[in-house]
Image (cartoon, grey):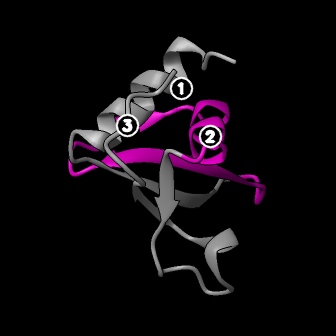
Amino acid sequence: MALPKRVRRAIEAVQSGLLLCRAYRVKEDGSGETTFAFEPSGRRCGRVTAEAAIASGYLTPQADGLLGAETAQTFRAASVQEPE
């Protein structure tokens, strides 16, 4: 199954050397949301796109998760393969 274009672009950005970073932002009303951005560029990545890129297997979590890989905050390219 081919990956959506936005997901492929996110994977390609990480394969080119950027990191995909997860953050949790608390809003003024007290609610919170998970956000994603590429570092060091700071360019944002949509949550659905980032989660799909992570789930694709082309990105690998770094060892910065408090409770293991499921809580990782930083993702790098798992390999140099081209996404489908």
Residue 64 coordinates in the image, percent (x, y)? 48, 80
Residue 48 has which mark? none
Q: Which residues are magenta?
A: 29-57
Q: Residues within 10 Å of mark 2 (few under 14, many from 20)?
A: some
What secondary structure is found at the residue carrying circle 2? loop
**Of callouts 3 and 1, the N-terminal one:** 1
Quadrant position of the N terminus in the picture: top right
Residue 56 has which mark? 2
Type of amino acid under label 1? Val
Q: Looking at the image, do the residues carrying marks 2 and 1 touch, with CB atoms under 8 Å apart? A: yes
Q: Which residue is the site of mark 1?
A: 7
Q: Is residue 8 left or right of residue 51?
A: left
Q: Which residue is the site of mark 3?
A: 81
- 32 in magenta: yes
**Of callouts 3 and 2, the N-terminal one:** 2
The residue at 65%/52% (across/down) is 34
What secondary structure is found at the residue carrying circle 1? helix
